[in-house]
Amino acid sequence: MSILLIAEHNNKELRAFTLNAITAASQIDEDVHALLIGNDCSNVAKFLSEIPLVKKVIQVEATHYKNFLPENFAPLIVKVSENYSHVISSANTFGKNLMPRIAALLDTSQVSDIIKVISPDTFLRPIYAGNAFATVKSTDAKKCVTIRPTSFEPCETSGGSALIEKVDAVEEFISSKFIKREEVKSDRPELGTARIVISGGRGMQSGENFKLITDIADKLNAAIGASRAAVDAGYISNEHQVGQTGKVVVPDLYIAVGISGAIQHLAGMKESKIIVAINKDGEAPIFSVADYGLEADLFEALPQFLEELNKLNTIQK
Amino acid sequence: MKILVAVKRVIDYNVQIRVKEDGTGIVTDNVKMSTNPPDDNAIEEAVKIKEAGTEIEVVAVTVGEDKAQETVRKALAVGADRGIHVKADGIIEPLAVAKILQKIVDKEKPDLVFMGKQAIDDDCNQTGQMLSALLNWSQATFASKINIKENKLEVIREIDEGLETIEVNLPTVVTCDLRLNEPRYASLPNIMKAKKKPIEEFTATGLGVDVTPRVQQIKVEEPPKRKSGIKVSSVAELVQKLKNEAKVI
Amino acid sequence: MKSKAKVVVVGGGVVGVSALYHLAKKGLTDVVLVERKELTSGSTWHAAGLLPLFNMSYSVGQLHKYAVDLYKKLEEETDQNVGFSVVSNIRLASTKDRMDEYYQYAGVAQTIGVDVKFLTPEQVKEIWPLCRTDDLLGAIQHPEDGYIQPADLTQAMATGARNMGAEIYRNTAVVGIKQTKDGWIVETDKGTIECEHVISCSGNFARQTGKMVGLDIPVIPVEHQYIVTEPHPDILKRKKEGLPEMGVLRDSDSRWYMREEAGGLILGPYEDGAPACYVDGPSKDSEYELFQEDLDRLAPHIEGAIHRVPAFGEVGVKKVYNGAICYTPDGNPIVGPAWGLKNFWINEGHSFGITAAGGAGWQLAEWIVDGEPTIDMLGVEPRRFGDYVTKSYLKEKNEEAYNHVFKIHYPDEERGAARELRTSPCYDRMKALGAVFGQKFGWERPNFFAIDGMEQKDDWSFRRSKWFKAIEKECKNVKENVGLLDMTAFAKCRVKGPGAEEFLDYLVANKIPKKIGRIGLCHALNTKGGVHSEFTIMKEAEGSYYLVSAGANQRLDHDWIQKWIPKDGSVQFENLTNSMGVLVVSGPKARELMTRVSRDDFSKESFKWLSAKNVDIGNAPVNAMRVNFVGELGWELHHPIEYQNHIFDRLMEAGKDLGLKPYGIRAMNSLRLEKSYKLVGTELSIEYSPYESGLDRFIHPNKGNFIGLEALNKWREKGFSNKLVTLEIHNIDDADVLGNNPIYENGKVIGRATGGDFGFRLGKSIALGMIKPEIATTGQKLKIDILGKMYDCTILEESPYDPQNNLLRA
């Protein structure tokens, strides 16, 4: 069995979650080949070849691959995947957008967002916003699987020396055109991989008040998250949303401030190692998943929290 | 112009689901069901486009058991013109749904196909993309804003890093995000009227689609329970515990 | 968690929390509540929160009134907002019968002290501009009524209870309840609690809780839906302009309630076809559960709502809630002691739980701490249902109770579900003779007999209807000839043993019969001196007594006896209700009739009034008791039930040329009123001392100790505030007193009627009533309200028909 792993990147660098996907792929079979499709992405190819778990890198270049349109990627991947048993990618928006297109073209029933590899054809995946886990077995000859990155460790990135093979591009799909991308740049750790996340909810009452959260995030070197309610109310932009239809995060520490704990939000963070809840409603559902709950007015508690943090001598980074 | 909207009947998002004791699935008997929420956004967007333009027909389609027709009726109550129900029982995988929708697309020849980006029961997030592939159409997933420009669609999509704008030619498949619009509520007279509108019926086998699942569900279980937590009485105590007990800061 | 407490309340909805709160308020602070999940997570959380003061029952009306008054004060007491919107409540009427119902109700309201106003359609329009009023006859308004936030109310009472020292354990499920010598052990999944009293407030789990102690609790929930709309511009406009909220609107004839909600509207119909749910109980994980909506079965009521309030059809439906509401066979909750078990209390079957919770908790606390409730709780008595209430009976009756919430509650209604359940042997014979049946405690009983030309069908009304003429015929026949009445439904039992005489002497306020074969009318008082039960006691043999009481009170009366019976084995109790039949013959020709069917001596000398003899009728053994409830010469023929038809046929055959005709319960009621005879639940109640009810000659305070004597003596010293009188109503030709009618003197309410009818032997419309003792003199002129109109009435002497009792002693 050989595993075709679709690398996610920005042509200059590999995106972090590809490392988790590689780990997952290697748990299915050790013969993992990374497929890199892009434009002018040789740096990334080199980086991939140094990953010990990657046995081979397949690099395909073309200008029409520059912006990762699935309509372009899918037919190429279908062609390359001929002798592979599995096609794997991470289940973030890149993978979610792309993999089903590949699966349909391969007439394969995709398995999405797995959290565990049980065997090459059997996986564990969350359903109903993670309120249940399903063990599923794929009976298709070729398997298309996306993996939940936070459930797998990122792999080692040095010590490997895989061959880089170049393959021809296929025809451009002209009915779709990339216009632009607005990336929200940040010095902060990325929400999906941060060790500490502090999230604000409806209780923050305004976008300005999120400053209370950002101050603490700065101190803890944490990523900033938000509930759907806070994003809907316009307090913060959508890429911060944690939840069933937002991001799933598993930090070591998740601090939920002014978040009631609706099921949809819990779906995105309940696997966090330690959960702290700060809310003035002692009966809010978030307290039932919190390891430490503080029933307090967040407008008093947050400044106090910052003060206490400043008193501590060292904070793990 | 014709817009085909696919809707799915799922357990209501407010319900606390329970896993069946024998692990074969989720309890659905006597449980409140409703339209998959992002599908409500899909219908709303289609109806908005219809209201803003002329000679636009909105057709709602669902795949599932007989009761699934309720979601089509809701779409009709909110402004869809016609309804289609493709009868299929049991778990129908996204690939099978995509194949069925492909047959419906072949019949109806819509210019746009809308659906929610993800169903809140199986959380697969596949159907729209698969349908698009089978039709060899463009795809615009996780749409949070749509602008129609002649024969093209300019779509702003929500991605991990922020927002991406693409332009796709018609016909195309769009999967909708919750932030696309605010779905309207149907008035009772419209709900009652919709009950009398005809819904065209097909069967999966009649359309020539084999819906046998390829992915077997071996078992379903509850996630491991978290250990219960404690309430702290002050911020100072919280910080102390995080540092010395949990050792996370 | 405590391992010992005085009282454990099972269930943390608004009902359980109110019970806990009231116990603590009454000074019983060593009390705990156990809730399997979160407070309110059963039905309370999804309730629409309405607080209807309207209820045709005197008991329930009092409970609701108390609650509404309490909820107003709760915020001050607990510092927690309960969201009580006192927006008033308007009930509409589109038919004359509905207006009659409101008039009758207004009388009840007057006597409880509930403020009710009658409105014209124009006045309705002023308050509810969005309401169509041109096809209305009128409306009533409760200014004090409104709606509340159920969860907030519950939390406020929980806070109040906790502040007083009570404890609440959430996420703690009761898995068993075991009886001990002095109380109970409640087993939970977190430990056990030893206690004296248990109160079951488990809502949808009522039957499961009951099973733990071997009780078949008559509660099964029914699905109820309500629709919430998005905001309507007209309502938003009103809010902006600072206009008041329009209040709760109830279109009774269209069978729904409606109120404002967040700028939109809520509509809650009580439709036909709503199914019972949780028939075998909710699942063990159930919480915050809702069912799939079914707008189809609401369709006629939605149309009615759009007709009445067109705005309702103009806005979108935000959500439809379909959740379980508990029901009992008659739609009133069950609040009181469980039968057969000491210190186990039932507070279940609440279909207006948000309102009733307050009053129910209040009375249960009184009952537990002081030993007795302070208001007549018969309307919500758990023992008003018997073991004929099977699960399948429950399902049918509860679904019926649900769809009757807005149907007109005629005083003579006999609901159709689960009928022909318990029939006495002569049922078919009575039917062939034209009987139109009703039921009491599951027993079919002829209410009246259809006369020539009449359809064999009932005709309900607040006024005289088709059966008026029918019972006139029956009453006149009893007066002139002889009538036959089936009273098999009587509750009957035997109390015997070496300690029986002493026990019965202690149980009742009268001297019990000393000679074998003698009969006494005896009353069991409760510990506060009010009248609890009425028994006819016959001494059968040394140490053996036969007791008869009203069929509706079988479980209540027998439970009372068994709870007081000494535990040393010196007294045995035997229920004979189902093994003995009763046929009553009454009228001047009764003696002639009896001599034709029996060789025994029925002469006046040999068979005195208030005596009993074992006789043969035909070939059947009969215990003939010379008593009756209609004031004529007559006998109650008690017989082993299997002989009934033999006896019936012999009587009918022999009585052909004597004019023997059957008569029914409605005629009986008219006849007894002419004799000023009293019934438990109306003239007799725990709220009245026997002296107030005119039972003086049946009470012997000097005979020795009996239950309630001490309290009665104290009461007498304090003074009585009521006296039972018999009234004649003048100049009325289309209706009679139904009961609960306010009685006036000089424009002030000085009492209420307890019952009434037309007396055919007297040719007068008569009533019984409780009024202030100062004006209770024969000949006093008063006024009485009948269906909204005032009538002159005069106090008559007691027993206006044959006051010397010459006829029945003949």
Image (cartoon, rainbow, N blue to C red):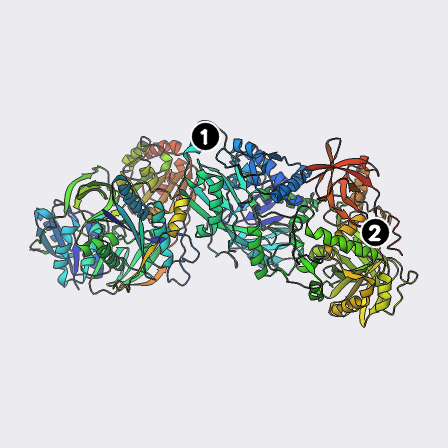
Q: CB of mark 1 within 8 Å of CB of mark 2?
A: no
- Specify the amino acid type for callout 1: Arg
Relative horizontal placement of residue A39, taking residue C7 as reference (left or right): left
Q: Amino acid at mark 2?
A: Asn
Q: Is residue C75 visible?
A: no
Work out whether residue C672 or residue C661 is closer to the camera in this orientation and state it. C661
**Is residue C677 at all visible to an observer of this figure?**
yes
Image point 8% across, 50% down: which residue?
Answer: A61
Q: Residues within 10 Å of mark 2 (few under 14, many from 20)?
A: many
Q: Nearer the viewer, mark 1 or mark 2?
A: 1
| Chain letter of the residue carrying label 1 | C
Alpha-carbon span between mark 1 and mark 2? 66 Å
Disc 1 secondary structure class: helix
Q: Establish whether labels 1 and 2 are both on one chain.
A: yes
Is C351 above or below relative to C430?
Answer: above
Above or below C639: residue B5: above
Q: Residue lying farthest top?
A: C241
Helix, strand or loop under label 2: loop
Left or right for C401, reference A103: right
- Where is residue C315, by image quadrant? top left
For this rendering, which residue is in front, C135 or A281?
C135
Q: How far from the left and from the top, in percent, is residue C268?
A: 50, 45
Q: Quadrant of the C terminus of chain A?
A: top left
User: Quick one: C121 or C186, which is closer to the camera?
Assistant: C121
The residue identified by callout 1 is: C238
Residue at numbered disc 2: C510
Please indicate whether residue B241 sits to the left or right of residue C169 in the image.
left
Instruction: Give the chain of mark 2.
Output: C
Residue count near mark 1 (Cα–Cα under 10 Å), binned few <14, some 14–19, many ≥20 = some
